[in-house]
Image (cartoon, rainbow, N blue to C red):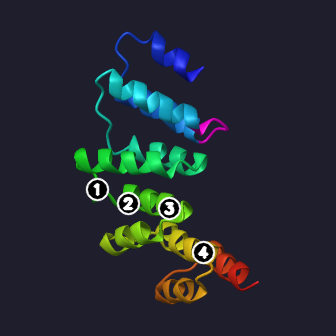
């Protein structure tokens, strides 16, 4: 349905694309969000800082980390590499894809770390069986939530 709406538009706009990509990235068809992103680029539209979080979310949800790396290069080319929300999404992508080296590099670059980035790092280390590093990240957190605690408890369980 989203593709149909997009294809029927004479001059699709970035906000329209963002809305459609957002919906698809949260659906059971996240790959469709990536397909729509490609169509957006092919139509000459320039993604903005609201486009990338949902495209990255679709990559994470679809477990297509390699495509996420390509999106990361788009983020840099568009000048959004220091956007804290986009950084947090990328950290989650890399940690979820078990590229903890890339996730840690981004995490260390962040000027503002939110709970998602902290929890993504902890979860990545727990999934890889590195409880020492997971604990070190957990200990550095100023604010912890249920996800932080549950991830650590599950790691030791």
Residue 85 lies within the magenta run: no
> Marks 1/3: CA distance?
15 Å
10 Å crowding of disc 4: few (<14), some (14-19), many (20+) = some
Front: mark 2 or 4: 4
Report, in whole angstroms, how far the alpha carbon at label 1 lies from the one at label 4: 26 Å
Residue 81 - label: 1
Identify whether 51 is placed above or below 43. below
Whole-percent x, y for residue 56 in the image: 46, 48
Q: Give the mark nearer the N terminus: 1 vs 4.
A: 1
Q: Residue 128, which numbered label?
A: 4
Q: How many marks?
A: 4
Residue displayed at 53% across by 44% down: 58
Q: CA distance from mark 3 to mark 2?
A: 9 Å
The residue tagged with tag 2: helix, strand or loop? helix
Mark number displayed over residue 87: 2
Place of residue 80 in the rendered image (x, y in percent of width and height, measured from the top left): 28, 51
- Magenta-span inclusion, residue 27: yes
Contact between labelled residues 2 and 3, with CB atoms less than 8 Å apart: no
Q: Are marks 2 and 1 in contact (CB under 8 Å)?
A: yes
Closest to the camera, between mark 1 and mark 4, is: 4
N-terminal label among 2 and 4 = 2
Q: Quadrant of the N terminus?
A: top right
Among numbered discs 2 and 1, the one appearing first in the sequence:
1
Residue 4's place in the image compared with 63, above or below, is above
- Circle 2 packing at 10 Å, graded few (<14), some (14-19), many (20+), is many
Element at label 4: loop
- The magenta span reads 26-30
Q: Are marks 1 and 4 in contact (CB under 8 Å)?
A: no
Up the image or down, 148 lies above or below 139; here it is: above
Separation of residues labelled 2 and 1 (CA atoms): 7 Å
**Mark nearer the N terminus (1 vs 3):** 1
């Amino acid at each position: 349905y989203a593709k149909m709406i997009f294809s029927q538009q004479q001059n699709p706009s970035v906000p329209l694309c963002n809305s459609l990509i957002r919906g698809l990235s949260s659906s059971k068809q996240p790959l469709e969000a990536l397909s729509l992103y490609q169509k957006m680029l092919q139509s000459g539209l320039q993604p903005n800082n609201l486009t990338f979080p949902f495209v990255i979310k679709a990559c994470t949800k679809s477990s297509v980390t390699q495509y996420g790396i390509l999106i990361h290069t788009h983020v840099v080319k568009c000048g959004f590499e220091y956007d804290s929300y986009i950084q947090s999404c990328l950290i989650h992508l890399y940690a979820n894809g078990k590229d903890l080296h890339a996730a840690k590099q981004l995490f260390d670059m962040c000027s503002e770390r939110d709970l998602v980035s902290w929890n993504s790092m902890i979860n990545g280390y727990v999934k890889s069986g590195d409880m020492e590093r997971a604990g070190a990240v957990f200990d550095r957190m100023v604010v912890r939530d249920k996800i932080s605690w549950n991830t650590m408890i599950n790691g030791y369980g």
